[in-house]
Amino acid sequence: MANTTTGLAPARAPKAPEAGALVATSRKRRYTLLTRHDKILIALMVGVPLTLDLLLIWGPTLASIGFSFTNWDGIGPITGENFVGFKNYQFMFTGYTLFWPAFFHNLIWLAWLTFIATPLGMFFAVLLDREMRGTRIYQSVFFLPVVLSLVVVGFIWELQFAPTEGFINNAFGLVKSGKLIDWLGNPRINLFAILTATSWRHVGYIMILYLAGLKSVDPSLREAARVDGASEVQTFFSVVLPVMAPINVIIVVVTAIEALRAFDIAFIINQGKNGLELLSILIYNNSLSEASLVGFGSAIAVILLVISLGPIILFLSRTMRTLA
Amino acid sequence: MSAVAAAAPRTTVRPVARRRLRPARTVLQAFLAVMTVAWLFPLFWAIYSSLRPYSDTVLHGYVSWPSNGLSFVNYQNVWTQADIPYFYLNTLVIVVPGVILTLLLASMVAFCCTQFSWKFNLIVLMLFTAGNLLPPQVIILPLYWVYLNTPIAMLGSIDIGRFSFALFSDNNLLYDQYIGIILIHVVFQTGFATFVLSNYMKTITKEITESALVDGANVLRIWWSVILPLCRPALAAMATLVFTFMYNDFFWALVLLKSGDKRPITSALNNLAGEFLINNNLIAAGALLACIPPIIVFILLQKHFVAGLTLGSTKG
């Protein structure tokens, strides 16, 4: 976290004196150095990307909320007759049999990442931070899956989990004895099979993030703790972990966002059916592939949006204080 | 063990601790070694399967020693039958302009938001950052509609053999077009890159920009010739990371492209699996071919990749 403090080093002048004025600030002078030409350039340099961002990200986000109150099918214009109030939500919560399973699958996904994959990544980081022999090799190995796409990760793990050809069933003699476990087909276990595959990638990601945080902890803090007679475990929980608070927030956010975004790997395995339903996949299936219930799909999207706002706001509130 | 340490007189605690450390280290090393094997095994297994001829695995099963040796025949087959080079080209056409445009736009926004104080710069940064954190599925339905309803000029195409890059559209729409995919990648990743580059640029003192202004340079010039060169490490890190993100994308291409012949390799792989359903060896070979570019990035540019990830986190 040494960076956080150095990041603030350049002297920051108080807020711009005039509302909306573009002012190059410095410690003493507070008059503008910018010509009109410069101001127009700045407006363009920010304005063009911002317009695209508003049109293609935030506009659609708001439109999703609007669509969720209609029964629009994506074809033709939306008229007042399409407006159905909260009917989509009502049906989603009470009549639609896939919503709650999908919701709980996302929840299980989050719980798995939070309590298994993320702690394992943090544990690896703590171990590898100790400058032991072969640290770099271990790091590279755990990090390798992070660069692979989830599609490829899905295929690689299918070779492990496939019922008759897969490695696992063969290696444990389940094929010969005829007691096949259908890891990807059995709806009671397939979610955990793909969570294993997902973790293969997630652990390395968390490890790298956490390792960077650990490296930035001032070594003298640990030294002081050791001199005071603290054990290594005590040092970690009472000294290192609190210092790492900012990166812990990032890790919580990354984990939550990953769990909400989950789509690719479940889609690759079986289009998110039969035990692998997820909110993101329900949106796709209801509105883009099997049916074109745009209004209903949007209502699911709104649920996903509302849940995502939690980690997003947490992230913004923690990071924006130090930025700009 | 801790009971022993606690009972021992204070002076002897240290040597005991040091001696105790050794078995602990061995356990750790063993644990890490086991985990390393576990981590590499799925990849190793994919490579092993891809090197075995299909007939061999049909006869002896997948978990068996190779009876006819290993060969690259699956790679040859998938390379030609699934037209892998063509899909590599599709990816290239999407990712290269995507990365360049993302870096240009993001560095402009980051430059303007960190080097000058104006009323809304924090809000602008928040919009970009938060936009990148949204699950893509939240925006996909309206975005799909936008893509189907935005008129785009048809100005012919650049043709190289079978490959045809439309200028700018071949159906008057953003939907099912290379530029459509490039556009959403750029906009989505600009959010992330802006956040990271702002974190980096805020460490550059504003006096540099100021003195350049005093010397009569305009802001565009300062951005290009003063600030960008100072940000070279961050730009390299971002380029590596954004390349990998775009290369690995599956969802945007799945929804916003219809024609199979425009798909980038990552999503083409999914069709491949449908075509060669039973031939796992061939699918393994295809999947491994699709991972070659990211693995090259991993080997050559790991430092930048890691720097990109951690720039975004440790400076938060």
Image: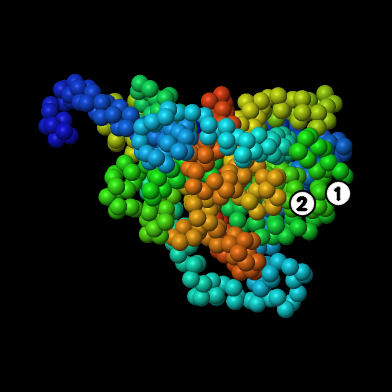
Q: x, y percentage for residue A282?
A: 55, 62
Evaluate whether label 2 is on the same chain as label 1. Answer: yes
Point out the image quarter for the N terminus of chain B. top left
Q: x, y percentage for residue B102?
A: 70, 38
As shown in the figure, which amino acid type bears the numbered disc 1? Ala
Q: Nearer the viewer, residue B131 or B261?
A: B261
| Residue at 80% in and 32% down | B219
Going from N to C along the chain, the mark reached first, 2 or 1, is 1
Q: Secondary structure at mark 2?
A: loop
CA–CA distance in space, label 2 to label 1: 10 Å
Q: How many marks?
A: 2
Which chain does the numbered disc 1 sit on? Answer: B
In this rendering, the answer to whether B230 lies above or below A180 is above
Q: Quadrant of residue A140?
A: top left
In this rendering, the answer to whether A314 lies above or below A131 is below
Q: x, y percentage for residue A317?
A: 55, 49
Left or right of A324 in this view: A124: left
Rate crowding at label 2 as few (under 14), some (14 to 19) or many (20 or more) other CA atoms within 10 Å: many
Q: Which residue is mark 2?
A: B174
Q: Which residue is mark 1?
A: B153
In this rendering, the answer to whether A82 lies above or below A104 is below
Left or right of B59 in this view: B1: left
Point out the image quarter for the C terminus of chain B. top right
| Residue at 42% in and 36% down | B56
| Residue at 35% in and 21% down | A133
